[in-house]
Image (tube, rainbow, N blue to C red):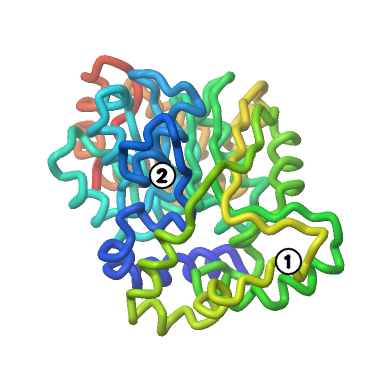
Amino acid sequence: MSNEDQSDLTHNYYEENAKEICQSYDQGYQIALIKNEKHKKSSLQNQNFYYLCELLNLKSGDFIADIGCGNGQFYKFLSTTSKYKACRYMGVDLSESQIQNAKKRNKNNPDPNFMHLDMNKFFSHEPYFDAYFFLESIGYTNKLDTLVKSISTGLKIGGKIVIKNPIKILNDVDKDKEFEEKFLSIQKEYGYADDSIGMLPSKQYIEEVFLENGFRLEKFEIPDYDVETYNTAFLSNESLKESHPNYVKHITEKKYENYAPNQYLECAIFVFEKVEDVVMETTSLPYVRQMYDQYTQDEPMDKVIQRSIADRGVDIMDPGLLEMYQKNPEAASAVIEQSTSTESNDINMGYE
């Protein structure tokens, strides 16, 4: 399956189910919510988000990217919580419908930045971000090495990546093959392509790829979590039940123990810290070259980057803005000039 097919499968799933997801899952379609005794008076959803923010000691003014932001629940929490409302935020999601839902959900919150973009094509020429969050989204990539290289270009040295995801810990490869044969149908129901790293990616594999790309593992843990909130809501939605018969069977049977000594966890947490730059130039990323060649036609990519910086005083991060710049320099200039009038030189990426 090609990269485009992978993106199409995931995109189509969330486009088709965006309405049902928003109606059914106040938690933003996360299967597992982390319990947090420190904030037990808060809703379970907010306990989950408090836990994730405190895991990083997130500070006022930190710039974070929410990769696979869905319907914008994490931003809603940040912007309405006094301790975090000054954090700068950008949400990225492959589904345009989910981005529109996120904007609607946060229409009364200050400056919500949501971008319709495939996370596999997310990159920056400058390290703007203090932290990335992958909240049950990283399994959709089918090229984890390329994803890690590309996202690292926008993360500061010392910056953190939080991955909250179902995880498998492998001790018996043959047993896992048996499990995957049965679980593949469930993954497909959720928009995962055959060659994606999957709904339950390997702990060992994720660690290996990050460690090879300039990160260190700061923490791995299995928190106290709740899945019944999700499953109860899921089983009450006839449309989703009808389109997910294999998942319905899975949550009623719960036969993970048949594949011991492997562990299949509904929720686990990784915290990675960036300790070095492995990708020195984003031009070394193959899809970046492909995109720039497409947008700039015969003009070399490095010349476009140099000219944009020289002419506008800022770097152009997103290919969509570069495309705008090529087609309509005046409109792009207005976007760039507005962004440079802010207190920092970070790019405001909340454009259409």
- Above or below residue 191? Residue 159 is above
Q: Amino acid at mark 2?
A: Pro
Does residue 171 appear left or right of residue 150 in this picture?
right
Instruction: Mark 1 or mark 2: name the one nearer the start of the chain.
Output: 1
Does residue 210 appear left or right of residue 11 in this picture?
right
Q: For the point 54% across and 76% down, which residue is it?
A: 252
Q: Which mark is residue 257?
A: 1
Does residue 63 appear left or right of residue 299 in this picture?
left
- Closer to us: 251 or 147: 251
Quickly name the residue at label 2. 319
- Above or below residue 20? Residue 87 is above
Residue 255 lies in what quarter of the image? bottom right
- Closer to us: 154 or 65: 65
Percent coordinates x, y for residue 10 in the rendering:
47, 66
Q: For the point 48% across and 53% down, which residue is it?
A: 226
Q: Residue furthest left?
A: 108
Q: Residues within 10 Å of mark 2 (few under 14, many from 20)?
A: some
Percent coordinates x, y for residue 344 in the rendering:
31, 16
Q: Residue furthest top?
A: 343
Q: Amino acid at mark 1?
A: Glu
Percent coordinates x, y for residue 69 in the rendering:
38, 48
Q: Quadrant location of the N terminus? A: bottom right
